[in-house]
Image: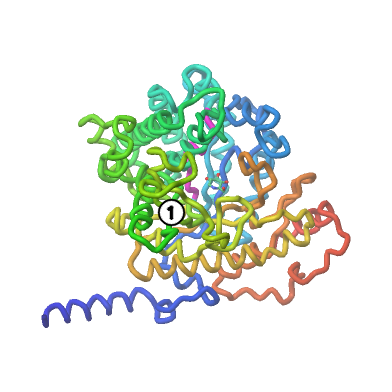
Amino acid sequence: MQAKRIQFLFLSFLVLLKYPSHARNIDDEDVKRSHFPDGFFFGTSTSSYQVEGAYMEDGKGLNNWDVFSHIPGNIKNNDNGDIADNHYYRFLEDIELMCSLGTNAYRFSISWTRILPRGKFGQVNPRGIMFYNKLIDNLLERGIKPFVTIHHHDIPQELVDRYGGWLSPLMQEDFVYFAEICFKSFGDRIKNWITINEPNLLVDMSYITGWYPPAHCSPPFGNCSAGNSDIEPPIAMHNMILGHAKAVKLYREHFQLKQGGSIGIVGMTKYFEPLRDNEIDRQAVSRALAFTNAWLFDPLVYGDYPAEMRLYLGSALPTFSPEEINYVKGSLDFIGMNFYTSLYAKDCIHSACISGWDSPIRGFVYTTGERDGEPIGGRCGIPGFFVVPEGMEKIVNYMKERYNNMPMFVTENGFSPPQQNDQVQVLLQDTNRVDFHRSYLAALARAIRNGADVRGYFVWSLIDNFEWIEGYSQRFGLYYVDRRTLERVPKLSAKWYKKFLANGTIDHSNEEDFTTRSFGNTNATTLGSEASKSAI
Ligand code: NOJ
């Protein structure tokens, strides 16, 4: 008993040492950078297709999103990423924005077809290598650590045409081939690699609902011209998991020791609350967590899919051979979590549910953002996203418990406002985004205070960008991007993040305060050129 008490006192003392007194009761209003451990990474995040543009320039080949977005009707307003934010040409200016914010990390992805225009069926494009070299070198020169995602949704169209992309096991080797070129070309300077972004989101959007390329689905999920929503998602997921694990194996055997980096994956994470206060919905919550988060992370940590998935999917869920288990299990140095929202979960085994949710691929769980017409949190521009800050603490705790508190990064967290208002003034006065980040950061700080090993937080996104099927209608950026001039204009949230990162020590009193400035009839073009001259 006495020994236990001494142990407890000693542990409490350690916690006190690590976290200053004001970190012990963190509410949204006073969350500060100093609530986070020393060496914590604060960054912003983007992905190649969403910001780069230059879609056919300097030798880049066509990818699946180039092709998909050019088919009328696929993307809101028929937008596409041909020009996007022209980051390919404006990356130096974008690095200036990062410096102005005071971030110490930047997460971006490498365009597969900029490096390998035809996948492994063609040559390496030296101009693609050159672009990322310049980006990386300039980031490092400015003290910003690059976190690099190797594959973020865009795959060479050549591989789609040849064998249907991620549905084919052949993709595993294609991915490893691409990853090896990345390790060889950039690995001397990259200390944090992310193999794939959100495989669990991708299989849902590409093979269950069919909203993303290759637009595969079957009723009742949708009426696509090809696909099977029950069968294809686990196959594509399996190929991505094996592709990831093989790339990690290669990195560990040939590069890690010399280059000294670490490697992980990023999953789409969601937290769930029971829709009704009963046992069957609490069980639905645990199934939803398994079918969303653990589908990806369980194999990579433990070498197999969650037991609930085996139970409900049966033979539709592929198995790992003993040899595969050897390299799949433990194939993560860290967990990357994109976290935006929590939802309610309702049981569909014992209760009646809308068609589709009562299916094995959904784990017999209906998920929704509303209970009796009341949203679970503030509404966002993306229909399935709600502002639920406490979900951040809960998901981090869930991952901490389930995966033995392995190092974690929040690789994306962000907000796009509902009812897009095209008035620039309103978009720049994004108090809702400031509240969002402040409250999610406070929740994250609480989870860290309680022992979670989270090492970084990345805002999605640095700049407004191409939001996949939503086109440019959703604006997640800390910086507004004028769609005509592509000039970047700081929003209130950029100013807030800057101040937060400086621990509140920035005095804006002698700067022009765009939060109170009246834009009157000023149009976006004028604003863009004025504001971008001075960053913030
Ligand atoms: C996650 C994805 O990784 C990113 O590409 C997307 O833009 C954001 N979520 C917002 O939906």
Q: Confirm whether the magenta stretch covers residue 148.
A: yes
Q: Which residue is mark 1?
A: 345
Position of 207 compared to 277: left or right? right
Give residue 216's position: percent from left, percent from top.
52, 28
The residue lying toward the viewer, choosing from 447 and 398, is: 398
* Front in this rendered view, residue 456 or 124: 456
Q: Secondary structure at mark 1?
A: strand
Range covered by the magenta-colored residues: 146-155
Q: How is the image coloured?
A: rainbow
Does the Cβ of the disc 1 residue fall within 8 Å of ligand 1?
no
Identity of the residue drawn at 51% across and 34% down = 220
Q: Residue at x 57, y 35 (%)?
A: 211
Looking at the figure, which quarter contains the N terminus?
bottom left
Which of the two residues, 298 or 56, is positioned nearer the viewer here?
A: 298
Instruction: Give the residue drawn at x 57%, y 60%.
Output: 373
- Say left or right for 367 vs 73: left
Q: Quadrant of residue 435?
A: bottom right
Could one spot residue 98 in this view of the protein? yes
In the shown orientation, is residue 342 left or right of residue 224? left
Q: Is residue 182 magenta?
A: no
Name the spot of residue 156 as percent of width and height, x first. Answer: 53, 26
Q: Few, some or many C-alpha atoms within 10 Å of disc 1 (few <14, some 14-19, many ≥20)?
A: many
Majority secondary structure of magenta residues: strand
Residue 436, position as x, y percentages in the image: 57, 64
List x then y, in percent, for residue 508. Answer: 69, 73
Q: Quadrant of the C terminus?
A: bottom right
Residue 300 in view: no
Image: 338 above or below 430? above
Q: Residue at x 25, y 44 (%)?
A: 302
Kind of residue indicated by mark 1: Ala
